Amino acid sequence: MKYTALLRGINVGGKNKVEMKRLKDIFASLDCSNVSTYIKSGNVFFESDQIRDRLHEKIMDSLSNEYGFQIPLLIKTHQEIRRIADAIPLNWKNDSEQKTDVAFLFPEIDFEETADSLPVKKEFIDLKYVEGAIIWNVKREFLNKSQLTKIIGHPLYQSMTVRNVNTARFLADNM
């Protein structure tokens, strides 16, 4: 089965440094095949016949042993990533006019109500829940008014990993 692993919180602001070549080697050592990475934010494409929950546990253990800290991660199938990317309205982009991100949700917060709990001003931001993710779009002129940056300090933020819309679409198109 084709999977994408989404690692949370690596290579951000010089913290939790993880080299992509070593990351690829770790996945290969766990009997994953066709392993490749995309950008340094922790996106790993791979194939495996192993049971997803068991594979998740093995990867978590290996990463912890290698780096000495826990790296939260999600493992999504190609179909799950595709379904999430297909839910992004085509006119939602990252450009000079707007900002669009996809927050992939860990199972403990994967509920439609999570979108309602985010500390944003909903009159300035469009939020869309799809199983496995919350997608948001904000006009850049309303970025500060939307209070989007408050998500970072919110407890829910620890149970999501965010990718910009371009990365999310790339993940779906290149698995």
Image (tube, rainbow, N blue to C red):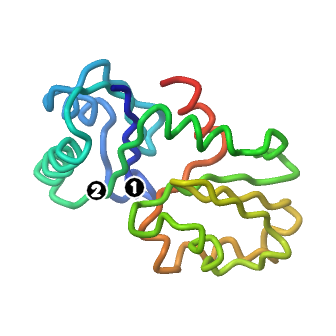
- The secondary element bearing badge 2 is classed as loop
| Mark 2 crowd level (few <14, some 14–19, many ≥20, 10 Å Cα) | some
Identify the residue shown where x is 78% and y is 74%: 146
Identify the residue shown where x is 47% and y is 57%: 161
Q: Which of the pair 109/15 is nearer the observer?
A: 109
Q: Is residue 110 above or below residue 130?
A: below
Q: Which of the 4 image quadrants contains residue 159?
A: bottom left
The residue that mark 2 highlights is: 71
Kind of residue sitting beneath label 1: Arg
> Left or right: 119 with respect to 12?
right
| Mark 1 crowd level (few <14, some 14–19, many ≥20, 10 Å Cα) | many
Kind of residue sitting beneath label 2: Ile
Identify the residue shown where x is 63% and y is 35%: 169
Identify the residue shown where x is 38% and y is 34%: 44
- Which badge, 2 or 1, comes first in the chain's sequence? 1
Q: Is residue 47 above or below residue 42?
A: above
The image shows residue 160 at horizontal and vertical percentages of: 47, 62
Numbered badge on residue 8: 1
